[in-house]
């Protein structure tokens, strides 16, 4: 099979490309390197440095490659950036997604090519019921979350108008190797490892009392979900599926687990709670279990250990 992965040089893109190559699949990567790194390339992948918003170029690429599926991960996934730069952010996050759908249509691949769209738990907004299922009302709180929700709407439109085979995966907080500090989703995990292995002068901090909890999902599980969605025999009808662990950890639990993994204390500066910070996130993943056979791992400590290893190796080599 042949796959196009957009956002191929980002955190999830790199890991997804690596898995597909391991499986012996042909992989074409597209990334404009606006935030991804050329060094995060996987041997065996054919790369194009290009912007997915370029509609004519995308059509030409689709005509040439004729993929089994496009896994569309390319985005500028920073909530704060989307608030400051709504035009630039919407271009990458919404227009980019429509450009991919349009390319499948215009390359006359509707009957052949599936789209797996990277959506986000940010479509739900704040004050949601837990665990949050896909039927929960969506009220995004940022242009980023809104663009993801609107792209899901376009996916539904392309399905109803043209029969596009498409599924949206609503990822929760993802962590793991190649999840870099300063990257799109710099949550506590990469930030605290950055202090421990990268730059000790970076002062790690904790906002609030640490009782906030997050559904932290390991990257390998997300990659499994991407591959399962891209390769499932039965097609999709523009469903949205939560991809998370289905259980949550408080930030204090994360701190303790990291300390156990690295064998030293993580001294955190205490800061006041951030205004608008969501107290808890927790995905209801029963739909992904049924639709994709999704089974996230349960060994949080081992996942943190492998993340720590990557940070250790990466900074030792730098
Ligand atoms: N990481 C998470 O926790 C998380 C959670 C929810 C949703 N998501 C979504 O998953 C996807 C991948 O996230 P990630 O963490 O790997 O992000 P990332 O920032 O690491 O990777 C995104 C990649 O897309 C590329 N890109 C951006 N705009 C582009 C464009 N117009 N054309 C071509 N390439 C472009 C960037 O250079 C980057 O390499 C994104 O769509 C994101 O919104 C991620």
Image (spheres, grey):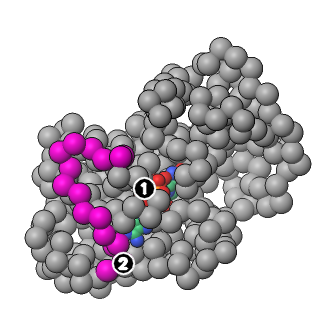
Q: Give coordinates of residue 165: x percent, y percent.
A: 26, 68
Q: Where does residue 67 sit, x and y in percent of width and height?
A: 16, 62
> Tag 2: Cα neighbours inside 10 Å, few (<14), some, or many (≥20)?
some
Q: Could you tell whether 89 is left or right of 26 in the image?
A: right
- Ligand 1 position by quadrant: bottom left
**Relative vertical location of residue 103 with respect to residue 180 in this rendering, above or below:** below
Residue 271 occupies which quadrant of the picture? Answer: top right
The residue tagged 1 is 36
Q: Is residue 46 magenta?
A: yes
Query: What residue is rendered at 86% in x and 39% in y?
Result: 270
Q: Quadrant of residue 161?
A: bottom left
Q: Is residue 287 left or right of residue 126?
A: left
Tell me if residue 241 can be seen.
no
Q: Give the residues drawn in magenta, as a range.
A: 39-54
Q: Would residue 157 be visible to someone looking at this image?
A: yes
From the Cβ of disc 2, is ligand 1 less than 8 Å away? yes
Report x, y in % for residue 117.
38, 63
The earlier-in-sequence mark between 2 and 1 is 1
The secondary structure type at the circle numbered 1 is: loop
Q: Is mark 1 within 8 Å of ligand 1?
A: yes
Q: Which residue is mark 2?
A: 53
């Amino acid at each position: 099979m042949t796959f196009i992965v957009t956002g191929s040089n980002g955190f999830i893109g790199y890991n997804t490309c690596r898995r597909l190559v391991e499986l012996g699949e042909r992989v074409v990567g597209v990334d404009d390197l606006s935030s991804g790194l050329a060094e995060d390339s996987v041997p065996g992948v054919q790369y194009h440095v290009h912007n997915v918003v370029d509609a004519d170029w995308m059509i030409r690429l689709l005509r040439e490659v004729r993929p089994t599926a496009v896994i569309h991960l390319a985005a500028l996934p920073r909530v704060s950036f989307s608030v400051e730069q709504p035009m630039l952010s919407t271009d990458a996050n919404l227009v980019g997604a429509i450009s991919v759908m349009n390319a499948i249509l215009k390359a006359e691949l509707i009957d052949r090519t599936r789209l797996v769209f990277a959506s986000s738990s940010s479509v739900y907004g704040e004050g949601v019921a837990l665990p949050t299922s896909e039927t929960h009302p969506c009220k995004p709180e940022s242009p980023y979350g809104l663009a993801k929700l609107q792209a899901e709407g376009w996916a539904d439109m392309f399905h109803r108008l043209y029969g596009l085979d498409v599924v949206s995966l609503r990822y929760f907080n993802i962590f793991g190797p190649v999840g870099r500090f300063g990257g799109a989703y710099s949550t506590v995990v990469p930030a605290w490892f950055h202090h421990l292995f990268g730059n000790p002068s970076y002062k790690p901090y904790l906002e609030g009392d640490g009782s906030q909890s997050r559904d932290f999902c390991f990257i390998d599980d997300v990659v499994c979900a991407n591959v399962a969605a891209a390769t499932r025999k039965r097609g999709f009808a523009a469903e949205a599926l939560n991809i998370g662990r289905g259980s949550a950890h408080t930030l204090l639990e994360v701190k303790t687990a990291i300390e156990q993994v690295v064998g030293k204390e993580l001294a955190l500066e205490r800061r006041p709670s951030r205004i608008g910070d969501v107290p808890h996130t927790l995905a209801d993943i029963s739909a992904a279990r049924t639709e994709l056979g999704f089974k996230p791992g349960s060994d949080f400590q081992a996942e943190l250990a492998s993340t720590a290893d990557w940070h250790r190796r990466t900074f030792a080599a730098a």
